Image (cartoon, rainbow, N blue to C red):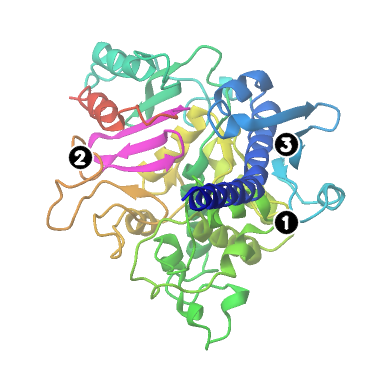
Amino acid sequence: MKKFIKRIVLLVLVVGLGYGINYCRVSFPIISGYGAKDICSAVFISHRDPKEVIAQELGKFPLKLGSFEVDYKDSSVTGSVFGFSKCKAIYRKGLGATLVAEISEEEIRKQHFALAHLPAVNQDTVAWPMGNKTNDILPDEVDQPALIAAVKTAFDEPDTTKPKRTRAVVVLYDGNIVYEQYAKGYTKESKLIGWSMTKTVNAALIGMLVKNGKLNLDEPAPVPEWKDEKDPRHTITLRDLLQQSSGLDFEEDYSKSSDATNMLFRRADMGAYTASHSLKDKPGSVFYYSSGNSNILARIVRQTVGENGYHAFPYDSLFYPLGMYSAVMEPDASGTYVGSSYMYATARDWARFGLLYMNYGLYNNRRILTKEWIQESVTPAVSSEKGEYGFQIWLNAGEPHSPANRTYPHAPTDLYYLDGFEGQRVFVVPSKRLVVVRLGLTQYKNFDSDAFIASVISCVK
C-alpha cells in the first residue's frame, strides 16, 4: 500500500511539473509580449508614467509576473518573466508601438511607409465637431444637473480594492458636447486605447472601399490563401467576415494560450496567421466573435489600397475628415494595422467616430460612408441569434421574437455600440440623438454599463 501511495504521489508530482513547465512555455511569451506592447503604447503615445501602467494595467495575476524595462533612447520596452521569454516592443513616430515577433527588430525598423501628414490646424480655434470650440448653451431637452449626477456615478469608487477606473466620459446630444468629465491625470487631450472598438473603425475602412466599388460584400473575400475554388474557405465572403460568421476554426480566449493570444503577441502577420486556419463551420451559419476575422479584414484593406497609399489611408480618408487628429492605428510586425485591437484616440475623437455613424455616414456636409452601409452595419446578422451583432459592431436589438432578451434591457433596441476590453464603449442611440463615450480600465467586471447608459438616456426629455 505504501509503495502504491508513493507511486501515486510521484505521478501527481510528475504531472504537475509537466503542466507547470508547459504553462510557462506557452504563457510567459504572452505575458511579456502583452506587457511590453501595452507599456510601449501607453508611454510613447499617451505619455504616461510606466510605473503607473505597470501598477494598474499589469497589476493582476498573471500579468504581474512580468518585469519590464523602458528604453527612452530607442523608444522601446522589453519584457520578460523571471528572465525568460524576452519580448520587445518598439515605438515609431506615426505608427505607434509594434511588438517584435518572427521578424527581426532590424528588419522592422528598416520598413519605410508613406504616412499621412497631420493637417496644420489649431482645433481650439475651430468649432466642434471639426474643432474643439463648444457651444456653452445647452438645449432645453437635456437635464444638465441630472446628467452631471449620472456621469459622476461612472467615476465613483465605492470599492477601492476593485476600482472601476473610469478615465473619460463624453456625452453628445444632437451632435454637440453637452457634458464631459475626466479622471485625475486625464484630460480631453489624453489618448486612450479602444481595444476591440478598433474593429468598428476597421469595418468603416472596408465600407469606404465598398463605397468606391473596390470591394463587394457578397463575393468571395479576396484572401490569397482561399483563392482556389476547391478550397472550402473560398466561399467565405466579406459579409461573413464582417458579421463574425466566417466559420474558421479560431479560438478567441484570453485566459490562456489560444489562437487569439498567439496571433496578437507571437505573430508578425496576424491576418495571414488567421487565414491559414481551417474551416470549422459553414460560412454564414454560426456567429463566433473572432479578432482573427478582423485582422483578415485589415489585410484585405492593405491589399486593396496598395502599398503606396495604405498607411495614410485611414488618416486621409477617415480620421482627418472627421477631425480625429489624435487617432493612432498601430501595425503588426509585417506592417498591417491591427484592425482587431490597436487604436488610440482621445475621448472626443472616439465621440467623433460615433457621430459619423449617428449621422448615417454624413459628416460636416461630406459623405464619408453611404447611408446604406450604416444601415446594413446595424442590421443584425442572421447568425447572431440574439440580434447582437452587425458589421463589426454590437447591437441591442434582442432576439427577433423576444427583443426583451438583450444586452442592455434598460436602453432602447435601436442602441448600438463599439465595445472594447476592460470597459471601453461608444454608445450610439439614434432615437435619443445621443453618442456616449466611456473609457477606462475596469478589470473586475464591476462597471454596470446598462445602468450607466440608462441613466444618461433618462436625462434627455
Query: Circle 2 is placed at which residue position?
Result: 412
2 relative position to 333: left or right: left
Would you say residue 213 sits in the magenta stretch? no
Find numbered disc 2 in the image and state the secondary structure of the residue it sits on.
loop
Instruction: Check residue 416 for magenta coloring.
Output: yes
Residue drawn at x 40%, y 36% as measured from the top left: 426
Give the CA distance from mark 3 to mark 2: 46 Å
- Return the residue nearer the eye: 386 or 459: 386
Q: N-terminal of the two: label 3 or label 2?
A: 3
Return the residue found at the far bottom. Answer: 230
Q: Which three-letter amino acid code belongs to the residue tagged 3?
A: Ser
Position of the C terminus by quadrant:
top left
Q: Residues within 10 Å of mark 2 (few under 14, many from 20)?
A: some
- The residue indicated by pointer 3 is 80
Drawn side of residue 184 relative to residue 371, left or right:
right
* Residue 325, image quadrant: top right
Q: Which residues are magenta?
A: 415-442
CA distance separating discs 3 and 1: 23 Å
Coordinates of residue 39 in the picture (x, y in percent) = 66, 31
Q: Is residue 229 above or below residue 7?
A: below
Q: Is 324 left, or right, of 435 in this rendering?
A: right
